[in-house]
Image (cartoon, rainbow, N blue to C red):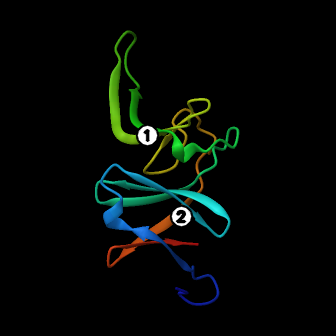
Amino acid sequence: MATGTGKEKTLYPVGLASEVPDGGRKIVEVKGMELGIFHIGDKWYAWRNVCPHAAAPVCEGVVCGTRMPSLVYEYAYGKDREVLRCPWHGWEFDLLTGKHLAEEDGVRLRGFEVRIINDEIFVAI
């Protein structure tokens, strides 16, 4: 489904929203790129399945939470179901923003807009 010309993006169908439960994911291929489609609460996210560290299939990693900044000997857990951990080296990324949790120099996952239209999932590229 094309949305127009110029800088407008094209919508690519990748599956049905009803097939991806809350907290779930689906790995798809669009335009030669492998993407992870994630359903978190009432939001949808699409991330390229390539870790910026070592090109691992990051979207196949564990979805979890992480330790939050806290005092010495205090271990506060947070961001439950909002962290994607790379399966190769454990790098953690915020599923809502794509940002690496420990790096402050702009390391992040490459993301794409997701639209749900009549139960169909589309990725805008």
Q: List the single residue furthest toward the top.
A: 73
Q: Give the label on residue 58, or none.
A: none
Q: Residue at x 65, y 62 (%)?
A: 33
Q: Measuring from the top left, give residue 73's x and y in whole percent.
A: 37, 9
Q: Do the residues under discs 1 and 2 have CB atoms within 8 angstroms?
A: no
Mark 2: few/some/many CA within 10 Å (<14, 14-19, 20+): some
Image quarter of residue 86: top right
Q: Residue at x 55, y 87 (%)?
A: 2
Q: Does 107 sit above or below residue 67? A: below
Looking at the image, how many numbered discs can be counted on the residues?
2
Q: Measuring from the top left, give residue 31's x and y in whole percent.
A: 65, 70
Provide the secondary structure element on which disc 2 rests.
strand
Q: Which residue is mark 1?
A: 83
Provide the secondary structure element on which disc 1 rests.
strand
Instruction: Name the amino acid type tagged 2.
Output: Phe
Q: Quadrant of the C terminus?
A: bottom right
Instruction: Name the amino acid type tagged 1.
Output: Val
Q: Give the label on residue 112, or none.
A: 2
68 vs 21, nearest the viewer: 21
106 vs 13, nearest the viewer: 13
Q: Measuring from the top left, give residue 48's x and y in whole percent.
A: 59, 55
Q: List the single residue furthest toward the bottom.
A: 4
The earlier-in-sequence mark between 1 and 2 is: 1
Q: Residue at x 37, y 21 (%)?
A: 70
| Alpha carbon distance from label 1 to label 2 | 17 Å
118 vs 112, nearest the viewer: 118
Q: Residue at x 33, y 49 (%)?
A: 23
Image position of 67 (left or right of 112):
left
Q: Does 14 sit above or below residue 47? A: below
Q: Measuring from the top left, give residue 96's x and y in whole percent.
A: 42, 51
Image position of 103 (left or right of 96):
right
